Amino acid sequence: MLLEVSERTQFGGVVIIRDTSSYSGRHLLKYYINCALKREEDVHVLGFEVPEQELRAGLDSNYMHLFHFHNAYIDPLGWTKQSSFTVKQFNTADVTRLVREIQHAKASILVIDSLSWVIRHHNPVAICQQLQELKRGGSVRMIFGLLHTDLHQQGIVDSISHLASTVISVTSVNHAHNAVAKTMHRKKSGKVMREEEFFTVKDDLTLSVEKRPSQSGHVQMQPDTKADPMSNLTFNLRLSEVERVAKEKVALPFVFSQEKKSALLKQSQGSGRIIYEPDASDDFDEEDPDDDLDV
Amino acid sequence: MFPDLNSILSSSPDNFREREFILLSDRQADASFLIHHYLTFYLRARCKVCFLGLVQSFSHYSVVSQRLGVNLNQAKEKGQLVFLEGLKASPRVLLNEDTSDTTHTFDYLRSPCAELRGLFEFVCNSLSQGGSEAGGEPWAPPVLIIDDLSVLLSLGVSAGAILDFTHYCQATVCSQLQGSIVALVRCDDEEWDEESSSYLLKALTHQCSLSLRVEGLSTGYCRDIHGQVEIWRRGRAEENQRRVFQYKVHDKGASFFAPGTSRAVL
């Protein structure tokens, strides 16, 4: 499913890549950017967290004219007066204007690196609203966002994920450079598809997906053909038909079965009757205290 | 500087990576010996160093660096080291006695403005001036060392403001000036909330390129092994690897060894 994410042609799709400090989702994000460039789509990146050269590294150089990096890394808050894009400009109107200004190709993709940075400076509710408006606005075909789940409360992570049509959660496997991605895709019909895949993204941004890791750390399952344990013994452990029937008939001593119950509750006739005559000071209650027992 | 650590990180004063964001952190241990390592390392490497000393006085670092073979006073006079003495200046600012221009640096001590923009401007001014040694050769790429960031949390600065400050420092020092940053964050075992040092540590881990985490031994105090350090190089897809070493701090340095190979044991 990881490979299919970028190929979907629906409008208004939001893909959220969720990562933690143990494995960065940026490699996967760069893979999707590369795919979009190769499909000759305009890619607009709102870069808050990493500088431009780090994001450009590895991308296909033939399509760099379609890659537009809006630099919010150098001066996102306006402190040094060199800002190209500030965090305050993260709103529907400004972003739409940015995207429409440079539109060479047939469709535009918006990449937000990262949403966690924006959430630190804006109200999460406002961000959800703006993402929703951008989704429906029609100026971008897809929105990709990177979210660091370990920096926010669960509620905020869930609200943003709820907006998305696809959520990919990446974690590392045993601290190796293999990683596992849990993808959840919500189709327009309402059907939800989930898949868990092991993947690696190399430096040249090639993605290789496997169903299970190459060096499996898990114990191999026992082979199904078990040897018959009763074959090489000097004594006989097998049961004949008659013996098996008799064995199943044996009443186990401490099991309270139907026959035992009826034997205990049967009233004995004749000998064994108890006649009790209470004294004057006795508090004789005719009621049976065990009446409510379901025995 | 510690030769053991240099060989583990494959770096030396003549040959080290540039544009690094090195995050030092500790939990129930004291990672400040690593600060002394990096201070002496970068001074030996002829880098221009801006040191934000918010928890100890200048003489403390001077005495320790003397033992490691570097003279801080000389470095300061030459212009190689710019030292911000947080402890000395803070009372003057708090009591409103200091009326010079430099009090803008300590804006974070005044409420309601708990922003670190003034501190960032101080860093900018000290490192972007460049300058050169008396012999005419310019200094190597600048380095910012911060000891430590978690004390700012106790002074009332929000974690978000600290993260903005480190972002700006990284953008200026690492990307523009091609230098490096070394920052120390100290964690207690407190509850995770959005203003705790654990949150700050997590957020900075996302930003950093090299993380050194110092912890005490899980089995308790030991005379010969003072703790363990986890070295984690982040960044490129194929480089993600973590290694654990144990260490012992001596009078004139520290030794690092693989777990279980302490000289007292072998």
Image (cartoon, rainbow, N blue to C red):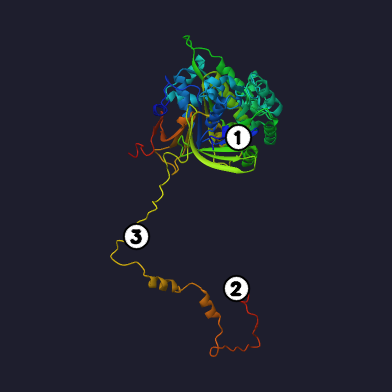
The amino acid at mark 3 is Pro
- Locate the C terminus of chain B by quadrant: top left
Question: At label 1, which amino acid type do we have?
Answer: Val
Q: CA separation, marks 1 and 2?
A: 58 Å
Q: Amino acid at mark 2?
A: Asp
CB under 8 Å between discs 1 and 2: no
**Label 2 packing within 10 angstroms: few (<14), some (14-19), many (20+):** few
- Please provide percent x and percent y for residue A110: 62, 28
Residue A245, located in which quarter of the rendered image?
bottom left
* Same-subunit check for callouts 1 and 2: yes
Q: Nearer the viewer, residue A158 or A75?
A: A158
Residue at the limit of the structure toward the left, as seen here: A234
| Residue identified by numbered label 1 | A15
- For the residue labelled by badge 3, is the local secondary structure a helix, a strand or a loop? loop
Task: Locate residue A25, reporting x and y percent.
Answer: 54, 33
Residue A12 position within the rendered picture, expressed as x and y whole percent measured from the top left: 65, 33
Determine the CA span between mark 3 and mark 2.
45 Å
The residue pinned by badge 2 equals A294
Q: Residues within 10 Å of mark 1 (few under 14, many from 20)?
A: many
Q: Which mark is residue A229?
A: 3
**Mark carried by residue B202:** none
Q: Is residue A242 left or right of residue B87?
A: left
Could one spot residue A40 in this view of the protein? yes
Which corner quadrant of the image does residue A66 belong to?
A: top right
Residue at 53 percent across and 75 percent down: it is A258
Query: Which percent across, then down, holds residue A207?
Result: 49, 32
Callout 3: residue from which chain?
A
Discs 3, 2 touching: Cβ within 8 Å? no
Number of labels in the image equals 3
